[in-house]
Image (cartoon, rainbow, N blue to C red):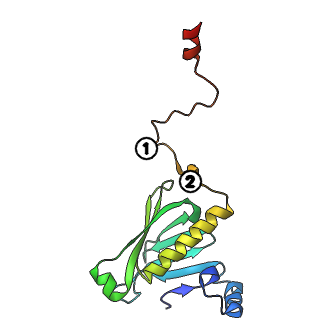
Amino acid sequence: MANTEFTGSAKPAADNTERKKELESGENRGVVWSDRKHHLWFPISFTKYTVKNGRVYRERGLFNTVSDQTLLYRITDIRLKRNFWQKIFGTGTVILVSKVDADHELALENIKNPKEINEMLSDLIEESRHSKNVVGKEFYSKGCGLEHMHHDFDGPDDEYFDDEM
C-alpha cells in the first residue's frame, strides 16, 4: 500500500523514462497524485483521494462506498488546515472550495505532505483554467452576493426617455 504517489506533471522531471512507463500502464493512466486518509502517520483508512484527468476524486467507505469528484477548473479557493497533532505527524487537511458543485467544499483530510499538495493543486487548477479559457466571471451566479448589480446591456431604460419628451 503506497502512501503518496506522484506521477504525471507533479513528479520531478529527472525520471522521464520512469514517468512514461507509469503513464503507459493502464492502472495509473493520467493519475497525477493519490493518497489515503492517514491516522497518525499510517494510511489505514477506507478514504482514498486521487487527482487525474482534470478532476479530484474522493472515495469513502468499505461496504457502502461514496464517490465524489470535482473538476479542477471549478475550484475557486484552496485552504490548508493543520492542527497540533497533524503538524507532529506530518499530515494536514487541504480544503477545496467550489461555488458551483452541490457540496461546496471537498476536504482532503489528513493527507501526507499537505503543503506540497496544496501548491501542486494550485498549479494544476491554474493550468486547467488556462487550457479551458476559464476566467473568474464564470463562477458568479445567484447566491454569491452580486444580485444587487443591474446588468442591462440593451441600451438606456425607457423611463428616462419618457421624462424628456
Identity, as a three-letter code, of the amino acid under mark 2: Gly
Q: Is residue 117 above or below residue 68?
A: below
Residue at the extreme top: 165
Q: Residue 113 occupies which quadrant of the picture?
A: bottom left
Residue 122: x, y in percent?
A: 53, 70
Q: Is residue 148 above or below residue 27?
A: above
Residue at x 48% of width, y 75% of height: 118
Residue 91 lies left or right of residue 57; in this view the side is left
Q: Are the residues at dot 2 and dot 1 in contact (C-beta closer than 8 Å)?
A: no
Residue at x 57% of width, y 85% of height: 6
Q: Kindly identify which residue carries mark 2.
A: 136
Query: Label 1's element?
Result: loop
Residue 59: x, y in percent?
A: 48, 73
Q: Earlier in the sequence, mark 2 or mark 1?
A: 2
Q: Residues within 10 Å of mark 1 (few under 14, many from 20)?
A: few
Q: Is residue 150 above or below residue 114?
A: above
Residue at x 65% of width, y 63% of height: 130
Residue at the extreme front: 164
Q: Is residue 23 above or below residue 15?
A: above
Instruction: Return the residue nearer the eye: 17 or 153.
Output: 153
Identity, as a three-letter code, of the amino acid under mark 1: Gly
Locate the C terminus by quadrant.
top right
Residue 23: x, y in percent?
A: 68, 84
Q: Which mark is residue 145?
A: 1
Residue 52 lies left or right of residue 78; in this view the side is right
